[in-house]
Image (cartoon, coloured by chain):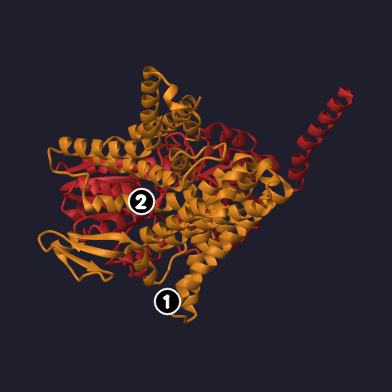
Chain colours: A red, B orange
Amino acid sequence: MSKRFLLLTLVGLLVLSIAPMLAVAQDDDTITIGFLPGVVDPFYQVMEIGVRQAVEDSALPVELVVQIPENFNPSVQTPILDALVARGDLDYLIIAATDKEQLIAPLQAAHDAGIEIISVDTFIGDGDYVNGPVTFPLSYIGSDNVEGGRIAAEALAENVGGTGKVYIQNVTPGISTTDQRAQGFREGIAEFPDMEVVSEDFNNDDENTSVQQTSATLERESDLVGIFGTNVFSANGAGIAVQNAGLSDAVDVIAFDATTFAVEQLRAGVVSLVIAQKPFDMGYLAVQFAIAHNQGVSSLPKRVPTGYAVIDIENVDDPEVARFIYQVE
Amino acid sequence: MALESQTDVSTLTATQQSVRAQRHVLLTLSRVWAWVFLIALIVFFSLSVSITSEGDVNFLTLRNSQNILIAITPVLLMGLGQTFVIIAGGIDLSVGWVMGLSSVISALLARDLVARGIDPTPAIFLAFAGGIAASGMVGLINGLIIARLKVPPFIVTLGVSFIVRGVALLFSGGQTVAGLPTQLRDFGNESLLYWVGGGANQLHFLRRPEVTGEQLRALDRILGWPVVITAIVVAIAIFLLHKTQFGRHTYAIGGNKEAALRAGVPVDRHTILLYVMSAVTAGIAGLLHSARFSGGSPTAGDPLLLGSIAAVVIGGVSLFGGVGQISGTVIGALIIAVLQTGLVMLGVEAFWQFIVVGSVVILAVLIDQSRDLIIGRAES
């Protein structure tokens, strides 16, 4: 009985391990690209639009495989990554790694299986794919979050004249993207001797908690000049607390990520600045890099910073700026 | 209490009487302990906030009281239906995503109805009705599977919460539903009364006074609409649980299901109703979320689920069923909110806030359990 079971298992495993090879054997000229973003949200949805656009614009046959994790979490993303690798037909993988350390080993395994890796939005290791600890990915295309936090700090400092107390509304400790934004913001503020980060609270991605914490902070720090919301919910809650305290003209609220909702709240006066990344650029370029590499281009840059746009009420209608709003439909 | 009348007091010795008196004090204290705990917290924060800020900052202000009241509304609404369900010996883990679903459905309806030329006020009413109907449906599904198919509520509501999550994300396309009518925003952020402080000292009813600059900062909103709505739901819940046969049946089912069945309580129908109620109160929280934050968010309620269950448990509702009161849940929600607001006002570092809040939740339940111990002793 148990021998039979063992035999069946072995046969099963054999079939499973041969199946991908069969799939590879069918593969001819088609370039198969996998796209694995961090989570379902407007930022990655726009990135996917960029990816699909680049595939459509390609003169060469490209097959696209898209998988989207339900949480921004390495323990959710890794099994999906493993499943993509197990398909055996991928030539390239465009991935927004949800953790810069925990994804190194699974991506190394994917690379060993013959898949070229392109990082978008987030990186693995320290992001330096030339001299850093991790060099196997083809390229890192994105605007890293530490830099984004620093840009938020500079934009805020400029708005308030480089002086005053500021506060950080963060999501949950341990999320790499938002933690890095907060870190960059602190570094940016540290450049201004007359500015100070008074505190940082975590709202568990709940706007209601963000209002509660911001209201309490406004009571404590009556001379606050600015608040950095590390994502749209955090900024929206903070902005509503500021508005209900009658402090809209005294306290600037910065939102990270230019979702249509964030821009609507900018127009309503709830937030004062919106930091936009360029997810379309990231997705589009990543596909082009994959195709170029497939065609033998050997001088692809290992790092492409896509930069940021800072949106405020004055420039929001300028088409040159408005095109960076994350329009999904 | 019934035991006191059975005992012949005249036969007790003096020492026995003094022991009884001591127990009586303990018993009374344990009954009102939640109030005592809440007041102690408020006193602590009032003193410590004043002392650490050298008198610049006050915890006991009108504005802060309103901040706390508005902060508890979603947690409390979710906790109200949950109180009934837990008293009846069940649990509803789907309320978090039901709140998100309701927020998304009501936001989509409000946006699309106004876009089709319907006046904002009736459109908002229809949108709210739609959000509540969607929530009630989820509750009905929970209740039917639990009552008719006899699947444990923990499993059913957990499974349903995944389904509801998917549905909410599908409807919203994974994004916050934006573009809502401004009347909805006003409903979420305006209030019954307004107080203009800072020397002007005027009270306004229903209509927000036109103020600017410094006066705008001195404007306090008293009893925001979300607080008013929540208060009405609390009143209905108190009436239902403590004054009606519906309430007595709820306790009976949680106390002993078999006995309730034999006594002729329609257990299945009642169970279904309880889960519908639980989903509907969570749905109301979702409507208020859309209004306050002028956006329909599928993830609105997910972070609140554990907090709402904590509020119910701190308030003295037994997770084993049969015991609990609505007032307990209200105080439980208040204790958590006062603690969170107070810690931020004290400027306590975020990581320590987690540790303190967690410790207080456990402490509160420990005290509550010791009450059972005292009651047990006093009655034996």
What kind of residue is marked 1?
Answer: Pro
The front one of A1 and B28 is B28
Considering every residue shown, the one lying at the far front of the view is B10
Disc number for residue B120:
1
- Residue A306, image x, y percentages: 40, 52
Q: Quadrant of residue B211?
A: bottom left
Q: Sort mark 2 into few (<14), some (14-19) or many (20+) by Cα contacts within 10 Å.
A: many
Disc number for residue B3:
none
Q: Which residue, given by chain and number where applicable, does mark 2 sit on? A: B71
What kind of residue is marked 2?
Answer: Ala
- Residue B118, image x, y percentages: 47, 80
Q: Sort mark 1 into few (<14), some (14-19) or many (20+) by Cα contacts within 10 Å.
A: some
Q: Chain of mark 1?
A: B
- Determine whether the residue tagged by mark 2 lies in a helix, strand or loop: helix
The front one of A85 and B226 is B226
Query: Alpha-carbon distance for marks 1 and 2?
Result: 26 Å
- Determine whether the residue tagged by mark 1 lies in a helix, strand or loop: helix
Q: Please give the name of the residue rendered at 46% of the width and 38% of the height, measured from the top-left corner.
A: B316
Q: Is residue B254 left or right of residue B330?
A: right
Q: Quadrant of residue B59?
A: top left
- Residue A166, image x, y percentages: 23, 46
Counting residues from the start of the chain, the first of labels 1 and 2 encountered is 2
Regarding residue A244, the answer to whether it shows in the image is yes
Considering every residue shown, the one lying at the far bottom of the view is B117
| Marks 1 & 2, CB-CB < 8 Å contact | no
